[in-house]
Amino acid sequence: MKHFLTLNDFNRDEILAMVDVALELKYESLHIGNKPYLKGKVLAMIFEKSSTRTRVSFESGIFQLGGQGIFLSHKDIQLGRGEPIKDTARVISSMVDMIMMRTSEHSRLEEFASYSSVPVINGLSDDFHPVQLIADYLTMIECGIYLTHHNPLYPTKGEGGRNPIVAYIGDGNNMAHSWINLAGILGFELRIASPIGYAPKADIITKAQDMCIQSGGKIKILNDAKEAVSNANVVVTDTWASMGQEEQKEQRKCAFANFCVDEAMMSYAQKDAIFLHCLPAYRGQEVSEGVLEGAQSKVFQEAQNRLHAQKGIMLYLARINKIPLVSVE
Ligand code: CP
Ligand code: NVA
């Protein structure tokens, strides 16, 4: 059983194949019409944290593929009242074809997956947000920054497009960790700038740096945001206080004061650099209103790509796990 708990569950070719499925589904959706590749399949979506994009993209996505989603808030199912993960996983997976779970500790997801008889997708944990990175990568491809990807539908911007520099400014959180994983797998230059004390986890960095030896990537951990952004092709940030860190908000506002991606910060990047943010965004904190709403910002294209990314992930997982599918013309 192949789950999708982190990007490291897949190698470079598998990530590229998954992205290709998402690109093909997007093309079909826009130009031909949605096809019911997952007709009759049921996706259970367990949310132990809030969500807008992840919920809507998975639920719309499974519907567009001919299947049905079931939204399960932890407040409504027995898991929230203390029913063990191992019991919940065995029961739900005996009735559905795929499960998406958003939770806190990553170990909850690992335990759930180890007891599930169907593929489990990480819809965000405290440590990783891998499905967001598939949408981010899709958006980069559409913007001509296609890394190692060679899709004839999308022209590149020359060498800068082929070997981009990605600068992630801010908290060493689940998003930072997933960018680190992607850089290790695909092999691009990633610079992370965080305040002292808020760097990404050392074991995740070390593992990705080891992978860079083969992939050709470069991962730099810095404390100076301007140094990180200098000549970057992609500038990314995320909230300073993730879900579950609400009580640290004020303390973090002080620690991250020099890490706002504003117009002055963007001026250090390449002129045609794009700005990405997984959203929700906090204007005036990690990003200025001007950058978020400006011409370089691709955040709403990125958010919309969650739909296509999720569809690609579900169909790819169904195929590699040999879930019986109806044939679709
Ligand atoms: N980016 C993202 O995962 O958004 P939601 O929390 O709204 O799902
Ligand atoms: N780092 C953020 C991402 C939200 C999509 C969080 O975990 O809250």
Image (spheres, rainbow, N blue to C red):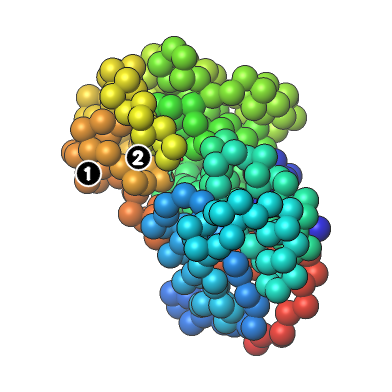
- Identify the residue at image location x=22%, y=24%: 264
Measure how far apart labels 1 and 2 are at the Cα level: 9 Å
Contact between marks 1 and 2 (CB within 8 A): the answer is: yes
Q: Residues within 10 Å of mark 1 (few under 14, many from 20)?
A: few
Q: Secondary structure at mark 2?
A: strand
**Tag of residue 294:** 1
Q: Is residue 251 above or below residue 93?
A: above
Residue sitting at x 57%, y 81%: 66
Q: Nearer the viewer, residue 197 or 277?
A: 197
Q: Residue furthest left?
A: 290
**CB of mark 2 near ligand 1 (< 8 Å):** no
**Dot placed on the residue nearer the N-terminal end, 1 or 2:** 2
**Above or below, comparing residue 57 to residue 262 in the picture:** below
List x then y, in percent, for residue 209. Answer: 67, 23
- Residue 318 visible within the image: no
Q: Name which residue type carries label 1.
A: Gly
Asked if the residue at label 1 sits under 8 Å from ligand 1, the reply is no
Q: Position of residue 218 (x, y in %)?
A: 60, 24
Q: Residue at x 56, y 54 (%)?
A: 81
Q: Which residue is mark 2?
A: 275
Question: Percent position (x, y) of residue 142?
Answer: 45, 54
Query: Helix, strand, or loop for circle 1?
Result: loop
